């Protein structure tokens, strides 16, 4: 009797699972991914917000200080000329990094031909994106080297004196951005090359019959069709600009005199380097950077939402 | 095709284009070529200030030999492999499941969970830095490859879910419907119906994540120190400190560090590009 009862219930549970399979299955599939993502990405964001209200050296007890870390940032009580220089450099990075998009488009247009060996050319042009930013940073710091760098050799040909790009407070950020633009342009180029492949040839022909040529054709017929590529190029370029860390760390470590710092690097310096472990203060810088990024994230999600609704 | 195909233009234009191509490429890759040149020069060329002339002797084998046999480089390379490969497997496995769940099932929280993954993928690393470092310390995984791998898997799941979900959305839904009518369980649909169709997406993600993780520097610096667990991107800085001003060795080291993702790209080019364009541009 007991056996049949046990059998009965097990049959029941199985059929319940079976009946509700389509409602339960997605959660089972999602569970491991969501768990990992919550623990390592979503919760830490909130923990950082919380931490920014404390003073903490990473080991001892945390001391609640309210908004003092933010006040310190705003008035630059702790590090003179660090926060606003970083903020200004972030802005320069954002603006100049966007040059990768038109530059990538230009190279893509240049390479969008069908001569022999063009595929190899395309891959070789893409090369800089595949190598790590650490190596890009090393390569460019040698390029800029005042004693033997290729840049100064070339400047010498046209009779210009040697310049020490990475040692000059006014040039250093631009020098690093130029290094960053190299792989980023390659990325945008590949996005546009794939986009150009999908451009409708009939519309081009129709445009030609209407007498459109060159820039007008590009602007009115080709670019509208490249919109998806442009969107992705914008997303990855803006994210890349605000994430700039590797190049600065490798090429200048924020110098000379902190003039090439950006928020991402300043935060790292404050929280985890010889300048002492000021975790709360670092978290406050990270929050500022996060809020800047959040404007863009919100915009990206909004565009994606519009597209989802349209389906 | 835009711009106008070159073969429809004058002979002069064709010749100009053909000769412009290699020149443009040389200029574009000049910084890299310089490093390649440095890496085969003997030490003496640098002390004699012969930076840009031809190498006075070919020392490529000596230089690369030093990198491989007299430095920590092989150790760092091995660490990189041991960090990158598990991450690729883990992230691709997790996101195939999440992508499947978000791409196939209709439920109220679907879009919100999807947006959580997408938004998380865009956050600046610095806002995660202190809590993730603490968590890793608490788990006793600081300065281990496992600690780095766990974080990388979690973070990459965001991007991979975005990719997988969009890919699954583009598959013919009728196949899944038909299987359901046959009474096939959801797990078996995932394993036998959907997974075989996802091979291109799996390949694309695998190459892409391999490159991202191999090239990671920030987390390597935050979560590890020392040659027993640091990957090659972080190792190259200590390598350079060891061989300060030995440009021929530093160049050879950089080239060795950069080579694996480059090889990966050339072997799997089609998949790589499909992955980069997020499948949004066909």
Image (cartoon, rainbow, N blue to C red):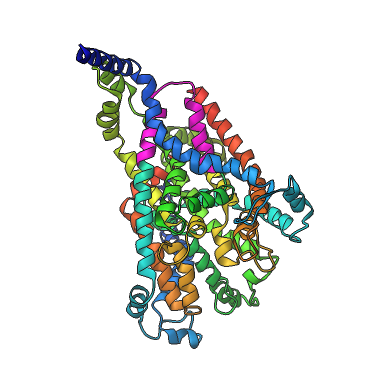
Residue furthest top as drawn: A1
Q: Nearer the viewer, residue A3 or B43?
A: A3
Q: x, y (%) of residue A6?
A: 24, 16
Q: Nearer the viewer, residue B201 or A107?
A: B201
Q: Residue at x 49, y 55 (%)?
A: B219
Tell me which corner region of the image, top left, top right, bottom left or bottom right, holds residue B74: bottom left
Q: What span is colored magenta in the figure?
A: B93-122
Relative placement, left or right, of B55 versus A167 is left
Q: Quadrant of the N terminus of chain B?
A: top left
Tell me which corner region of the image, top left, top right, bottom left or bottom right, holds residue A15: top left
Can residue B164 be seen from the camera position used here? yes
Relative height, residue A154 to residue A170 (above, below) = below
Residue furthest front as drawn: A2
Relative placement, left or right, of B125 versus A164 is left
Q: x, y (%) of residue B238?
A: 48, 70
Q: Nearer the viewer, residue B203 or B41?
A: B203
Q: Does the magenta portion include B101?
A: yes
Tell me which corner region of the image, top left, top right, bottom left or bottom right, holds residue B106: top left
Relative placement, left or right, of B260 versus B236 is left
Relative height, residue B16 to residue A63 (above, below) = below
Magenta span: predominant SS is helix
Q: x, y (%) of residue A264?
A: 61, 54
Give the total number of marks visible in the rendering.
0
Q: Does the magenta portion include B14?
A: no
Relative height, residue A236 to residue A29 (above, below) = below
Can residue B12 be seen from the camera position used here? no
Q: x, y (%) of residue B205?
A: 37, 44
Relative height, residue A202 to residue A237 (above, below) = above
Q: Quadrant of the C terminus of chain B?
A: top left
């Amino acid at each position: 009797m007991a056996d049949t009862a046990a059998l009965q219930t097990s049959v029941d549970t199985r059929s319940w699972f079976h009946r509700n399979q389509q409602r339960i299955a997605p959660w089972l599939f999602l569970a491991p991914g969501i768990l990992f993502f919550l623990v390592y990405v979503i919760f830490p964001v909130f923990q950082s917000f919380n931490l920014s209200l404390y003073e903490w050296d990473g080991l001892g007890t945390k001391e609640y200080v309210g908004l003092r870390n933010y006040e310190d940032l705003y008035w630059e009580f702790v590090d003179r000329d660090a926060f606003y220089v970083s903020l200004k450099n972030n802005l320069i990075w954002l603006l100049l990094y966007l040059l990768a998009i038109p530059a990538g488009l230009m190279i893509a247009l240049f390479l969008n031909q069908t001569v022999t060996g063009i595929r190899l050319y395309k891959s070789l042009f893409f090369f800089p994106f595949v190598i790590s930013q650490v190596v890009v940073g090393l390569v460019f710091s040698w390029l800029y080297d005042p004693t033997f760098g290729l840049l100064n050799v070339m400047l010498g040909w046209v009779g210009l004196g040697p310049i020490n790009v990475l040692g000059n407070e006014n040039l250093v950020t631009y020098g690093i951005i130029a290094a960053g633009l190299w792989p980023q342009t390659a990325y945008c180029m590949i996005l546009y090359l794939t986009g150009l492949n999908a451009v409708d040839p009939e519309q081009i022909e129709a445009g030609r019959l209407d007498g459109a040529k060159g820039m007008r054709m590009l602007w009115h017929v080709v670019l509208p069709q490249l919109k998806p590529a442009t969107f992705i190029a914008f997303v990855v370029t803006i994210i890349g600009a605000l994430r700039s860390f590797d190049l600065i760390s490798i090429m200048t470590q924020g110098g000379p005199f902190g003039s090439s710092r950006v928020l991402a690097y300043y935060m790292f310096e404050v929280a985890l380097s010889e300048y002492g472990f000021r975790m709360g203060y670092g978290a406050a810088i990270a929050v500022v950077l996060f809020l800047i990024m959040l404007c863009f994230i919100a915009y990206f999600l909004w565009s994606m939402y519009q597209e989802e609704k349209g389906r | 095709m835009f711009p106008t195909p070159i073969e429809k233009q004058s002979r002069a234009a064709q010749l100009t284009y053909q000769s412009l191509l290699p020149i443009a490429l040389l200029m574009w890759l000049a910084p890299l070529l310089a490093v390649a040149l440095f890496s085969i020069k003997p030490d003496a060329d640098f002390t004699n200030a012969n930076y840009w002339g031809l190498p006075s002797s070919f020392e490529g084998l000596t230089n690369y030999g030093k990198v491989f046999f007299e430095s920590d480089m092989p150790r760092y390379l091995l660490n990189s492999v041991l960090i990158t490969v598990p991450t690729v497997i883990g992230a691709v496995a997790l996101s195939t499941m999440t992508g499947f769940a978000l791409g196939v099932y209709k439920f109220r929280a679907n879009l919100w969970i999807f947006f959580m993954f997408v938004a998380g993928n865009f956050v600046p690393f610095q806002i995660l830095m202190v809590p993730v470092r603490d968590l890793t310390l608490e788990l006793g995984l600081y300065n281990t490859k496992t600690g780095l791998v766990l974080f990388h898997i979690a973070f990459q799941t965001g991007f991979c879910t975005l990719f997988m979900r969009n890919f699954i959305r583009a598959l013919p839904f009728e196949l899944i419907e038909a299987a359901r009518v046959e009474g096939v369980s959801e797990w078996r649909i995932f394993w036998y119906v959907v997974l075989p169709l996802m091979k291109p997406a799996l390949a694309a993600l695998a190459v892409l994540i391999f490159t991202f993780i191999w090239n990671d520097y920030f987390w390597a610096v935050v979560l590890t120190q020392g040659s027993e667990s640091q990957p090659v991107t972080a190792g190259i800085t200590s390598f350079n400190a060891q061989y300060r001003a030995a440009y021929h060795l530093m160049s050879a080291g950089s080239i060795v560090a950069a080579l694996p993702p480059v090889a990966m790209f050339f072997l799997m080019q089609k998949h790589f590009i499909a992955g980069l364009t997020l499948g949004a541009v066909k």
